[in-house]
Amino acid sequence: QMHQQLQQRMQAQMQQHMQQQIQARMQQHLQHHMQNQQNQHMQNPNMQQQHMQHEQHNQTPQPPEPPRQNQNPLTGAPYTPRFYYLLEKRQRLPAWMARQDFLKLMQANQVLVLVGEPGSGKTTQLPQILLDAGYHVQMGQVRAICCVQPTPLATLSASLRICEELEVQVGTFVGHVTRFEDRTSADTLLRFLTDEALFREAMEDPLLERYSVIILDEVHQRTCELDVLMGILKMVMQRRPELKLLLLSSSMEVKKVQAYFEGGAPLLQIPNRTFAVEVFHCQDAEKDYLKAAVRTVAQVHTTEPEGDILLFLPLEDEIDLACQLLRKESVHMMNFGDLQVRALYVGLPIMETQRVFDQTAQMRMTAGKPCRKVVVASAIAETSLAVDGITYVIDAGLVKQRAYNPRTRMEVNVVTPISKSSALQRTTLAGRQRPGKCFRLYPEQASSDWPEKVYPEIMRSNLTTVVLMLKRLGFDDVVHFDFVDPPSPEALMRALETLNFLGCIDDNGNITEVGNQACRLPVDPQIAKMLIEAPQHRCSNEALSIAAMLCSLPVWLRPNDAFRAANEAKARFAHMDGDHLTLLNVFHAYKQQIQDGHDPSRFCAENFISIRAMRHAEVARDHLKRIMESIGLQMISTDFQDKEYYPNIRRCLVSGFFMQIACLESEKRGAYSMLREGQEVMLHPSTSLGHRPEWLVFHELALSSKLFVKTGTQIKPEWLVDIAPRGYFDPQKISEKSSARGKMEKLMARRQGQDG
Ligand code: CDP
Ligand code: MG
């Protein structure tokens, strides 16, 4: 019955699709493919029955119109010269040249793994090739092709690039969905999604029936989300034999992934065509690799023949700083030609990241003088975004990685050495167009004990969100879920426990109403819980603003030459009770500027606030608000004059983050202890708190020289007892190492005294 309903829904959708949406030329295009597909299905006895069912919905063929030259069939507009320019480039890409083999293997297999070096055209060409071959028509229905990318930046970049190549508007024929943005329509046949977005679609449509092909890009990165998606898709494919899965990789390390699928997924390798790269190592370990990096760029620029430079650094801050230094430096090197500096990392606005693709040849032409480009990038440039024209790679040999300790429940980002396979991958990027050079900012022997390859992220991640999603999708027994590489049982148990504390699953492990609501909100379960509880604490609007700010980019800018001014600006917004409330102040001030008709960018510049972060927060807030309303959460606020205005917000923070509480141990050192774990942590110097409150709720941990808590707000211990689940803060549950144990004992005794 369920199946029938689904079918009816699909048919209704399909009719609508056919009737109103697709333009006349598009329909012809489809018609042609449908007939082809029908012929194929007739030869396949298993498919025949399904084919018969759908036949009645096929439209009567229209007389074909002769195709007009130079006209874009998708828009009816004439192609511009740029289209032909790009087309010629595209047709020279290895992925395009492997088209015939690729289509043959796609036809013959349900799952295909395809390997090709970065820049060979996997991401941009293969989806178009599938579309041209008619893969969007399946069993008489129009279905979309889905391309999943591991980051929002890669998602956006791919979508924009293909729109450019096809000369269509974003959101029409090609579009993308990221966490807070959906730029697709019912017509969109090529849908670029972040991994998380596909999870969310699976919640609405468990068999993902809107798709005929699903492409998972960059599977060699083995991100936690892609791994789990592979598991889900493996099940879906059993129920939907017609669904095709294409796994793309920029590295040969895919044996594990191939073996994971029934009978072993076949592999197609697009022929490599890289040139030799000469590798140089530093003599000694560089203490200040940032300085060494800048020095090396200058050296290449002043002594090496033409060719662009790609510099790998682990942290976003360092990338910004290196760009600043290089821009200053470039002034002194004018004799050697212009040095154009570009940054590339997740979190930059998309327009800025697209500028890394600016062609040096073109820059040279417009500037009328020699010119060289240096791209300072995070690991995203290793495989996800391939920049052309690179001849020199400079590699610090480090990467920012997630690390998770289930025992202490701590997930932190740490800078670690890259794997040997990453080091090689980075090196080969210098030889994509011609022979190149790679300068490694570490001595050769240093890399001898580096890991061979990337350790799957699922083994070092906090699994709370993933486990909740799996529960929601009906995988009850997550411990026995068919993972490519199973995470540690301890990490899974921790995730289940956390979800239980948050009320997202009950004691039997079944998903609860709160859990279902949390799944609808595209934020961490803790923030989701805070939003769900907000109406009860009478601070829905405020919790929403704080949540949006927490999900956004770093808010405070710290320009090197205006450190003091930046700190003074920050102090103007500081709330004495904590950083969450400071964030709220900033958001309110920003909105006020807009309301008063002022230009918010000026306000942001004057106060060293990132306008990008603010815009991002605005979008996130609107999106989250719509969802909150749609799941029946009321928008209630306390009057600003009411003395409970801020305490209500602070209580609401505790309702989501009661697992992240710190208790003061030493005022002088600013040292705190985490309650259940006993671990010592320090309050991060970036805090806007002027004093050291006895109790803090905090948003995150950061590991550098010490372990720091970031974004903290003062709370009262009574709230912990009232708001956290029963028994969570029983004194015996608190670490003996924390003074909170004694304090909580006293508090409980006092309370019992009051009750009696
Ligand atoms: O996915 P893969 O690494 O195999 O390559 P791709 O991302 O499809 O890139 C194919 C070609 O398009 C490369 O030469 C890229 O440099 C180029 N490209 C570009 O010029 N601008 C973009 N926004 C994306 C790709
Ligand atoms: Mg790619």
Image (tube, rainbow, N blue to C red):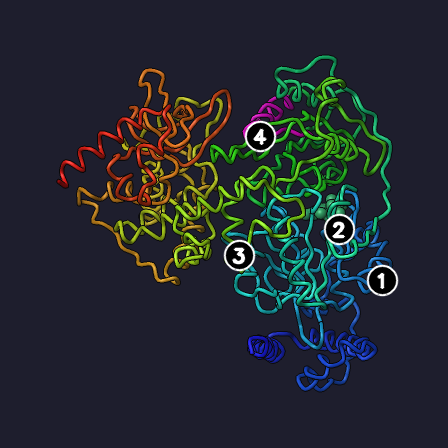
Disc 2 residue type (three-letter) = Lys
Tag 2: Cα neighbours inside 10 Å, few (<14), some, or many (≥20)? many
Tell me where residue 494 appears, x and y as whole percent.
49, 41
* Along the line of sight, the residue nearer the viewer: 733 or 209: 733
Of the two numbered discs 1 and 2 on the same chain, state the one appearing first in sequence.
1
Residue where numbered disc 4 is placed: 315
Residue where numbered disc 3 is placed: 476
Tell me where residue 610 appears, x and y as whole percent.
45, 37
User: Disc 3 vs disc 1: which is toward the camera?
Assistant: 3
Residue 204 within the magenta-colored segment of the rendering: no
User: Disc 1 vs disc 4: which is toward the camera?
Assistant: 1
Marks 1 & 4, CB-CB < 8 Å contact: no
The residue range painted magenta reads: 311-331
Quadrant of image for the C terminus: top left
What residue is at 60 percent from the left and 45 percent from the top?
Answer: 224
Disc 4 residue type (three-letter) = Leu
Tag 1: Cα neighbours inside 10 Å, few (<14), some, or many (≥20)? few
Marks 2 & 3, CB-CB < 8 Å contact: no
Marks 2 & 4, CB-CB < 8 Å contact: no
What residue is at 52 percent from the left and 50 percent from the top?
Answer: 467
Main SS of the magenta segment? Answer: helix
Disc 3 residue type (three-letter) = Asp
For the residue labelled by badge 1, is the local secondary structure a helix, a strand or a loop? helix
What residue is at 39 percent from the left and 36 percent from the top?
Answer: 660
Tag 4: Cα neighbours inside 10 Å, few (<14), some, or many (≥20)? some
Residue where numbered disc 1 is placed: 104
Disc 1 residue type (three-letter) = Lys
For the residue labelled by badge 3, is the local secondary structure a helix, a strand or a loop? loop
Residue where numbered disc 2 is placed: 122
Q: CA distance from mark 2 to mark 4?
A: 27 Å
86 on left or right of 413: right
85 on left or right of 521: right
